[in-house]
Amino acid sequence: MPPIHTAIVRPPAATFHQGITTAGLGTPDFAVALAQHAAYARALEAAGVRVIRLEPDPDHPDSTFVEDTAVITRAQGILTRPGALTRRGEVESMRLHLDPLLSGLSAVEEPGTLDGGDVLEAGERAFIGISERTNEGGARQVASWLAIHGIASILVDIRDTPGLLHLKSGISFLGGRHVLAVEPLAGRARAEGFDVVPVPRAETYAANTILVNGTVFLAAGFPFVEEAVRALGLDVVSLEMSEFQKMDGGLSCLSLRFESRP
């Protein structure tokens, strides 16, 4: 996997608690969320990543989840068209930041919808989830765009899978042929030739990880998953994510990660 050189993050705004959530875990503590986000950014820097910190966007309570606004690969990007109407205003702001950083920038077009959290690159292939936020039209637009860059796509319908807002809520790439996956997605991954590290139902939230320059970022408090990932010989950084979990967000949601410089 090519090294990640750059990541874009945006701290939560004071309106964060007004965002979309189905978690039922209560209202996030804003001060704790800021501290957790700052620790996340520092961990990226410790892994050798240049971190670009954007200003909070109080007009868009979910805007800290920057991953949903674009898909980036090989110094090329495609802006998304989020499935939630309240999030579409985040995309233009991200375009202004990405345009000078990438050598090419496309966009998902109407009537397609797509959230970046539904696209998982796994080497030379990508899983694209069809979800409540991403429709088949948007998924196929991104699949065609990825094909231009030599990445074949596998479309996975997760609309009838309980507990998964996005595809990456239930599966993540660990490098090589390994993925971490919840049971409903494990069979599909195995059918595509991947070795699956299973995630028990009690630790479903831990299925959302990110691999950053050889280190796996993992939500803290999930010992079974952490032990299984370490058993692969991978380094692990555990990060507190409680306040973002309350708002249906995970580790991957909090950054847009660049595999190479333009």
Image (cartoon, grey):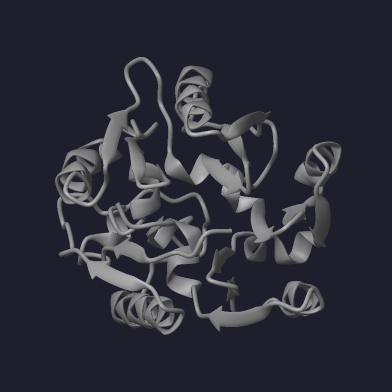
Q: Is residue 211 visible?
A: yes
* 143 w.r.t. 251: above or below: above
Query: Would residue 124 appear left or right of 102 to someone viewing this image?
Result: right
Q: Residue at x 23, y 44 (%)?
A: 90
Q: How many marks overall? A: 0
Quarter of the image where the N terminus is located = bottom right
Q: Residue at x 34, y 63 (%)?
A: 7
Q: Position of residue 115 (x, y in %)?
A: 43, 38
Name the one closer to the observer, 23 or 159: 159
Name the one closer to the observer, 23 or 147: 147
Q: Position of residue 198 (x, y in %)?
A: 82, 59
Q: Position of residue 13 (x, y in %)?
A: 21, 64
Residue 91 falls in image quadrant: top left
Query: Would residue 60 appear left or right of 168 to someone viewing this image?
Result: left
Q: Residue at x 57, y 66 (%)?
A: 211
Q: Residue at x 16, y 46 (%)?
A: 93
* 33 w.r.t. 150: above or below: below
Q: Is residue 165 visible?
A: no
* 117 w.r.t. 53: above or below: above
